[in-house]
Amino acid sequence: MAAKRQINQIRVGAILSYVSMGLSTAISLVYTPVMIQRLGDSEYGIYQAVLPIISYLNLLNLGMNSAYIRYYSRAKVKNDRSMMAKLNGMFLLTFTALGLICLAVGFILSFHGSVIFGANTTPEEVALGEKLLRIMTVNSAVFLPLSVFNSHITLHERYLFQKIVAMGKQVLNPLLMIPLLLLGYRSVTLTVVTLAFTLATGVIDVYYCFARLGMRFSFRRYDFGLMRRMFGFTVYVFIGIVVDNFNWSIDRLLLLWFHGTTAVTVYTVAAQLNVYYQSFSAAVSNVLIPRVHRLVAQRAPMRNLDNLFIKAARLQFMLLSGIFLGFVAVGRTFVVLWGGDAKFAVDYYTTLLLFFATIWQNVQLVGYEILRAKNMHKFNALCGASIAVFNALISIPLCIAWQGLGAAVGTMIACFLGGVLLMNWYFHRRVGLDIPRFWRRIFQLLPSMALPLVAAVAISLLAPVRGYLGVVLWGVVFMAVYLPSLWLFGMNRYERGLVTGPLRRLLRR
């Protein structure tokens, strides 16, 4: 019964993740153009330029969430309650200290805005950027200790509660932001509202952990020896997170330095769409993290990990391919509508490049979690660091020459070399995952993509896609081709069962 309940939680969690992301994306169709229009290129560009800096500050968690999940999963398998309480106490103290460090670093940076934002910004833009940086720093500092409670909920696989709270935050946040923008409030108010939502959801997580999960803490003795061993594990997780943030945020900073705030605003449309694209893939892998660590802790056969890896990857590939081809079909019109100006037309090609860079890496997200569970993620971190340097070196001339489009080309090349070629060699030769079998199972889906690809290109070149209604209608036409083709020529019995099983249960009721 417990195992069945866990499987149901995983399925519900994945479904709610997609519902939440769908609602959030739909709201963003309205929210982002309103934000760009109300704030203007200058203020919106500064707002977006601060976000990568905050993403770097968030790295002060040092990847400790992964260590918490790994060590707590091992204690849970052994039913060692005293160790679980000890880990809870240690990580809460550690993340509180890291939050204070984050606060100090962020405020120090906020007094050097002219250096951070470059010579192409005005004094007014610098002053605004410094103010936004201080508010967002407080948000990050508060989030760090609260993340312990969110990770605890993940460990117990209570995805129904977790995703409902996340959905409420993702939906209510922009629904409150839009009226504030229309009333004349600016970016400072928006960041304060985001901070309020962080505090509110954090309080809800804390209450749930104490009231429903019986979370216990032990602060009697901080085990520095254990923490040193954990830091040995997390140092490479941390490097990997730094590299990932660098690869996906360096483009905006380069654009700000070489071309100013308007170039950042134009590129942000493509970058934001890629964030949504990545999150759709992560919805599957995120709910499988506890299961991966549990299988490794139980010393399950490698074949079990291979099967889990392939199942998740095929689902991710079907979803990401559908979005990619759908964007080929109607994205040209969509980016101009969403951005609100013809200057955003270049984001069609920029987004396609970012999507193409993302898809091959993100179908392997479970594989990266297997590395962490096995404490074999050192190569990934060092490989990623080398590729990040390569990304910066090739993106600088490309960015200078072709602005956002050139920056996206540099990111795509770097991601393919590091995330696909080098990491697949390591997965197969060192970890023991059956990568040839993995890609055979992925490529078995390609014949089902042939007809949808033709349909997507035909719609893009020939169809009169006008306005949001045209985007929706022609998007439905594409899906009417993609879904039957996938069902008939791509999906296996297990994947069809994920659709027909819930439908049969619903019809019986």
Image (spheres, rainbow, N blue to C red):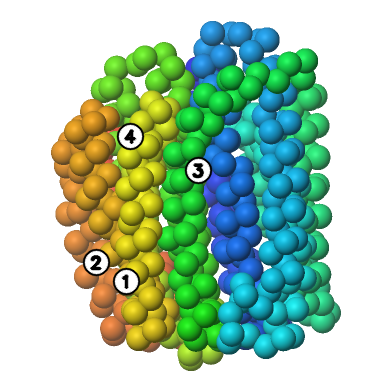
* Label 1 crowd (10 A; few <14 / some 14-19 / many >=20): some
The type of residue carrying mark 1 is Ile
| Callout 2 crowding tier (Cα within 10 Å): few <14, some 14–19, many ≥20 | many
**Label 4 vs 2, first from the N-terminus:** 4
**Dot placed on the residue nearer the N-terminal end, 2 or 3:** 3
Q: How many marks?
A: 4
Q: Is residue 171 or residue 76 the one in the foreground?
A: 76
- What's under tag 2, amino acid-wise? Leu
- Identify the residue position indicated by label 1 in the image: 394
489 to the left or right of 223: left
Q: Secondary structure at mark 3?
A: helix
Of tags 2 and 3, which is closer to the observer?
Answer: 3
Amino acid at dot 4: Phe
Among all residues in the image, which is located at the extreme bottom?
Answer: 342
Residue 203 in picture, x, y percent from top left: 81, 40
For marks 1 and 4 on the same chain, the one whose residue lies earlier in the sequence: 4
Q: Which residue is mark 3?
A: 238
* Residue occupied by mark 4: 309
Secondary structure under tag 2 reads: helix
Instruction: Indicate which label's residue lies in the foreground, 1 or 4.
Output: 1
